[in-house]
Image: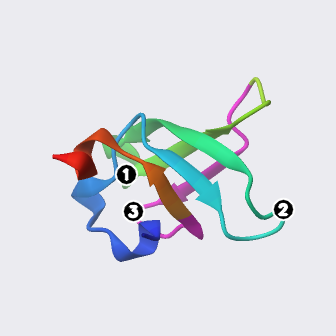
Amino acid sequence: MRLCDLPEDKIVVGMRVRSLVPPHNKLGTIISIDPKDDDFTCILWDGDTIPRSGFYGNDCECEVVESLELKQ
């Protein structure tokens, strides 16, 4: 499932995602969501030491790999 197809309240910290834009198949973890900044969400990509990507709301070209929220 793509992040852009999810309601914003289903996007949670700890969710694992895969990039759908080059470089494809890059994996990462959502590490923060800032409700004071229009729900700006940061992704920490595997192998990086600082978050280099982010998005507002559900405007992200990624797919969900794993989420505890979606398993319930």
The secondary structure that most of the magenta stretch takes on is loop
Which residue appears at 78% of the width and 30% of the height?
48
CB of mark 3 within 8 Å of CB of mark 1?
A: yes
Is disc 3 surrounded by few (<14), some (14 to 19) or many (20+) residues within 10 Å? Answer: some
Query: Sequence-wise, which precedes: disc 2 or disc 1?
Result: 2
For the point 74% across and 70% down, the residue is 21
Q: What's the mark number on residue 39?
A: 1
Mark closer to the chain start, 3 or 1: 1
Q: Which residue is labeled 3 in the image?
A: 57
Q: Nearer the viewer, residue 45 or 35?
A: 45
* Magenta region: 50-62
Is residue 71 rendered to the left or right of residue 15? left
Above or below — where is 59 with respect to 50? below
The alpha-carbon separation of the residues under discs 2 and 1 comes to 25 Å
Within the magenta stretch, is there residue 58?
yes
Q: Could you tell me the amino acid type at mark 2?
A: Pro
Query: What's the residue at 26%, 52% (across, down)?
Result: 70
| Numbered tag placed on residue 69 in the rendering | none
Dot 2 corresponds to which residue?
Answer: 23
> In the drawing, does residue 62 fall left or right of residue 52?
left
Looking at this view, name the residue that lies furthest to the right: 23
Amino acid type at mark 3: Gly
**Callout 1: SS:** loop
